[in-house]
Amino acid sequence: MRRIQESVLAPIERKALLWFAGRLPEWVHPDHLTILGFGSMFLAGLFYFCCRWNPWCLFAVNACIVANWFGDSLDGTLARYRNRQRPRYGYYVDHITDSLGTLCLFAGLGFSGYMSERSAFALLSAYLLLSIESYLVACTLNEFRISFWKFSPTELRLLLIVGNTCLFINPWVMFLGRRYLLFDIGGAVAVILMTSVLAVSTIRHARRLYSLEKI
């Protein structure tokens, strides 16, 4: 299928991934990188939970996010670079582990004390719905969109790292005269943006499919 990656950092990221792929030892396989990507997301969720007792765990979360980028972004690149592609297996395993890893991340964040459980649930729901829309388009139009409105998981990881650093300094913000958790405000903004992207994409793709299959 055609991969659509039009994010801000896509050109730099593409070169970096190819550089890494050309220098990894032969014993490192794409499956190893997929396991690294999932394991780091699981640990990120665990470290978020541990933040209830030690805020320094936020920096461990940041390290896990970097490891997740390395594993999750490089597994497919390595398979293509070595011409050892298994399209259906790779597509399935990569995205089911992404979904489970995201669940672990937001579950940990919801229990961290830095975001309310409701905000974490809303953010997880919006993310998974947007992912489902992307997977359905891949099945029906043979196009897999990785980025939306110049944002991809890479940019989201960077925002999360910056946000975690801000949390360590001060987890609270003033908004309209009231004090809120920083990540509750950020999560609300993210939910609104992802819901908007979902609505626009759903309407556009439904109209496109309708025009392709007129009765």
Image: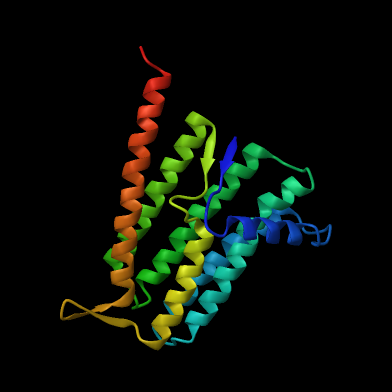
Total of numbered circles in the picture? Answer: 0
Q: Position of residue 165 (x, y in %)?
A: 46, 81
Q: Residue furthest right?
A: 26
Q: Which of these two is toward me, 73 or 50?
A: 73
Is residue 185 shown to the viewer in this render? yes
Is residue 116 shown to the viewer in this render? no
Q: Position of residue 80 (x, y in %)?
A: 73, 45
Q: Which of these two is toward me, 10 or 98?
A: 10
Colouring style: rainbow
Name the image quarter holding residue 36.
Answer: bottom right
Residue at 27% across, 81% down: 173
Figure quadrant of the N terminus: top right
Q: Which of these two is toward me, 36 or 168?
A: 168
Q: Position of residue 87 (x, y in %)?
A: 65, 38
Figure quadrant of the C terminus: top left
Q: Is residue 89 left or right of residue 134?
A: right
Q: Is residue 205 left or right of residue 57?
A: left
Considering only vertical position in the picture, is 5 above or below 209? below
Residue at 49% across, 76% down: 47
Q: Residue furthest top?
A: 215
Considering only vertical position in the picture, is 40 above or below 211? below
Name the image quarter holding residue 200.
Answer: top left
Q: Is residue 56 left or right of residue 205?
A: right
Residue at 31% across, 49% down: 196
Q: Position of residue 128 (x, y in %)?
A: 40, 50
Name the image quarter holding residue 110.
Answer: bottom left
Considering only vertical position in the picture, is 82 above or below 117? above
